[in-house]
Image (tube, rainbow, N blue to C red):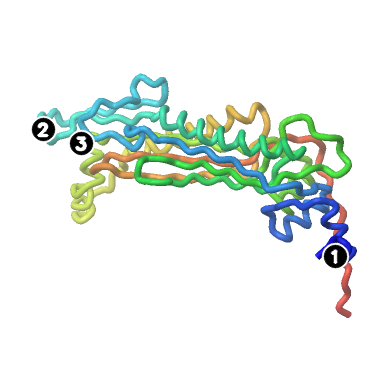
Amino acid sequence: MSPSDLPEAAERRLGHGAFSSGLSVADFAACLEMDLEPVGLVQGFCAMQWSSYAGGLRRGMTPYGGGQGGYVENYQCPHGMISGEHRMWGQNYQQTWIEAAWTEGFSSAYSRMLEEATALGADGIVGVVDTQSSLSDAGIIEFHLLGTAVKLKGAPVATGTPWTTYLAGQRLAKLFEAGYAPVSVVAVVSSVRVWAYCMTEYLMGSGGASMWAQNTTPMEIEQVVRAQSAARAIARKSARDQLHGDSLHGADLQVLEREFEQGDVEIQTLLRGNRVRRFKEFEALPVPQPTVRLS
């Protein structure tokens, strides 16, 4: 089929060039209403080889956390018993090397997504989705970021780094309505390892179950509670360090736990959100006007 055989509307669309988008129909329409024109689907990848020790240490090996400058808390046996099976010591510590490796992988994928958006002349990236998945049993983790690059209609050619946000559509419109503009996505991870001492092992094992069966007074597992609190606090502090005085909108905190032995646990938290900055006072958007009457 020659170009002259195409319908006039098709020739007009092809003449303006094609673009790709990861937005839903509703989000796409909302972006156009805000004068944000999609220019392409952009992605970033990074595959990281996770070191063998990143998956957790076996009992009896020397812990790596004590000299890393992060959170460390020690626990001592209150019984004074000495035996090969009795755990006389325990420790919670921040696994800073895991956090550093995760940050490197995420940042590399994020930077490559920005490079694709910059090549398209985009002002920002909306609807960002980030995932981490294992590629094999060899400890390889793939970081994948994806979003829709957009240009502000009528704005001069973009020269700076595009802004990014997990938001799109009406949620993004409400953000602008409230007087905030997106700056960047924020994603941080924290990792805390629990090496159980005798009381933690007892309460998390068969001893704790028998205690409940005897209707004795419940006991808080202090070491695990402290580790959970520390993991969340570390993630919040890391996020604040990236905000530089801006606000975090739409925060989402996910917690993953892995148990290696009885009472030995690894706690990882992933905190995501949108870094936003106020640019005006609240101003309500115009009320939508009905276009179809049913009466």
- Dot 3 surroundings within 10 Å: few (below 14), some, or many (20 or more)? many
- Dot 1 surroundings within 10 Å: few (below 14), some, or many (20 or more)? few
Q: Position of residue 231 (x, y in %)?
A: 43, 35
Quarter of the image where the C terminus is located: bottom right
Who's the residue at 34% across and 37% down the image? 55
For label 1, the residue is: 6
Which is more N-terminal, label 3 or label 1? 1
**Kind of residue indicated by mark 3:** Cys
Q: Position of residue 34 (x, y in %)?
A: 82, 49
SS category of the residue bearing label 2 = loop
For label 3, the residue is: 198
Circles 2 and 1: CB atoms closer than 8 Å: no
Which is more N-terminal, label 3 or label 2? 2
**Kind of residue indicated by mark 1:** Leu
In this view, the residue in front, 234 or 1, is 1
Q: Position of residue 239 (x, y in %)?
A: 56, 33
Who's the residue at 60% across and 36% down the image? 110
Q: Quadrant of residue 89?
A: top left
Who's the residue at 20% across and 30% down the image? 60
**What is the spatial separation of the Cα atoms under label 2 and label 1, in whole angstroms?**
83 Å
Q: Is residue 182 above or below residue 127?
A: above
Mark closer to the observer (2, 3): 2
**Kind of residue indicated by mark 2:** Gly
Who's the residue at 78% across and 57% down the image? 29
For label 2, the residue is: 84
Quarter of the image where the N terminus is located: bottom right
Mark closer to the observer (2, 1): 1
**What is the spatial separation of the Cα atoms under label 2 and label 3, in whole angstroms?**
12 Å
